[in-house]
Amino acid sequence: MTAPAPTRRSGRWIERWDPEDEGFWKATGQRTANRNLLFSVLSEHIGFSVWTLWSVLVLFMGPEYGLTPADKFLLTSMVTLVGAVVRVPYTFAVAVFGGRNWTIVSASLLLVPTVAAYTVMKPGTSFGTFLWIGLLAGIGGGNFASSMTNINAFFPLRKKGWALGLNAGGGNIGVPVIQLVALAVIGASGGPRVLLGIYIPLIVVAAVCAAVFMDNLATVQNDTGAAKDAARDAHTWIMSFLYIGTFGSFIGYSFAFGQVLTIQFGRTPLQAAYLTFIGPLLGSLIRPVGGRLADRYGGARITLWNYVAMAAATAVLIVASRQKSLVLFVSVFVVLFVLSGLGNGSTYKMIPGIFQAKALAEGLAGEEAVACGRRLSGAAMGLIGAVGALGGVGINLAFRQSFLSYGSGTGAFVAFLAFYGLCFAVTWAVYLRRPAAQAETMTVQETKPQLSYADV
């Protein structure tokens, strides 16, 4: 029996969407979901590039711009802050406008900060002006939240780890790509306006592709009750905390890496640009692998051991920073980027699994449990993504204070090491620790199973 195709109405709206139905998924759902995933990645990719634009622009801004290292760290901190805050409304915009429609709008909005930066990027512009224009670039960070919410609705639970990891990884890779483009521009003796001029037409391409190839799901609706339930659920805030350690590290280090190399190790902008793209590139590419490993072994397990590795890498960075060893510093920083990307994939995989496990533990079954898990996880993703991105603000402010107080980034790395240790403890205590008494009393006959979160 052939599964029915998605039911559509005008404006590229899909009325019927049931990815958990194997027949539907194989016959028509998978093809449609993958097409939307592809062009969602494109738009999110450009969004990440615009969001992290100022991590590159500050490398162009030499002494003639009159900005101190503290000014530059403050600038990138505020850009990161706006990107974190706008993730909340962007999450709910998908249900209000439709995934396709909002992707068109959110992609088009990227023209505002790009054109504005093109206009003011010259010596003599005040720091206040740069700060306000930089804040506009923060809207690029919101594209991640709306894209993840949209793609989460297209894929079945068994495919979410890979799909969300691929979607996020493809977006994250916008960070190293803009750094590579900047390297080419600097190498060709071009200025920052050349870089901005390259991205303006790419934004238009992303918006047009969304209009032509993407779909809206009528089944995705805003549920204020779900948002309130997710905000009241302790797991939302626990996962937000853990996501600070993974994605917050990725985006924070992406903004700060080049500045650390120029300030602490005396690299020129060109020399820094040769190195800064490597970590974000590898961290982006490995994110889907983190999701795939989480699908297979459980997100909590992968996340736990990933924090162990992140703490170990940070400890080595402290040694490299104190010894001023550039080779060791860059090598281990790249490893830390890779681990942050791996953890991004595993933590995001945990979110839908946690809420579906809770639904099953509360006595729901089948499609009812799936619907409940999807409802709460979709609402929670916006909050988790927003809070997690605030980690990038903390990292840049920590570097700013460390350089002001000690003249190096060592103090900041000590704080990061302590934080990763705390993330490890929380992951183990909440999602992997299982009291012996509980394990002994569990039986397959229980009507209300006490599920472990180790497999989410």
Image (tube, rainbow, N blue to C red):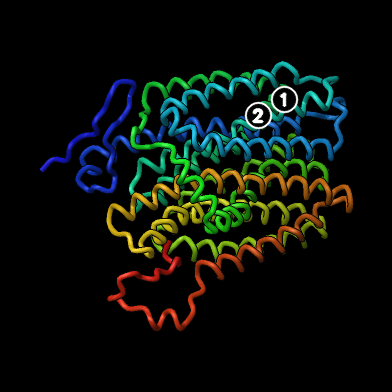
In the structure shown, which secondary structural element does the residue marked by tag 2 occupy?
Answer: helix
Viewer-side residue, 101 vs 366:
366
- Compared with 90, 196 (above or below) is above
Q: Is residue 26 left or right of residue 423?
A: left
Image quarter where the C terminus lies is bottom left
Q: Residue at x 30, y 35 (%)?
A: 32
Residue 85 in picture, x, y percent from top left: 63, 38
Q: Are marks 2 and 1 in contact (CB under 8 Å)?
A: yes
Residue at numbered disc 2: 137
Query: How far is mark 2 from mark 1, CA to CA?
Result: 7 Å
Residue 92 in picture, x, y percent from top left: 49, 36
Q: Do we see residue 338 in this rendering?
A: no
Q: Which quadrant of the figure has residue 75?
A: top right
Residue 383 in picture, x, y percent from top left: 56, 46
Amino acid marked by disc 2 = Ala
Image quarter where the N terminus lies is top left
Amino acid marked by disc 1 = Ile
Judged from this view, the residue extending furthest toward the top is 119
Viewer-side residue, 72 vs 186:
72
Q: Which quadrant of the figure has residue 10?
A: top left
Q: Do we see residue 409 in this rendering?
A: yes
- Compared with 181, 350 (above or below) is below
In the structure shown, which secondary structural element does the residue marked by tag 1 occupy?
Answer: helix
Q: Is residue 314 left or right of residue 147?
A: right
Q: Residue at x 51, y 34 (%)?
A: 44
Judged from this view, the residue extending furthest toward the left is 1
Residue at numbered disc 1: 133
Q: Is residue 424 left or right of residue 92?
A: right
Q: Which quadrant of the figure has residue 438?
A: bottom left
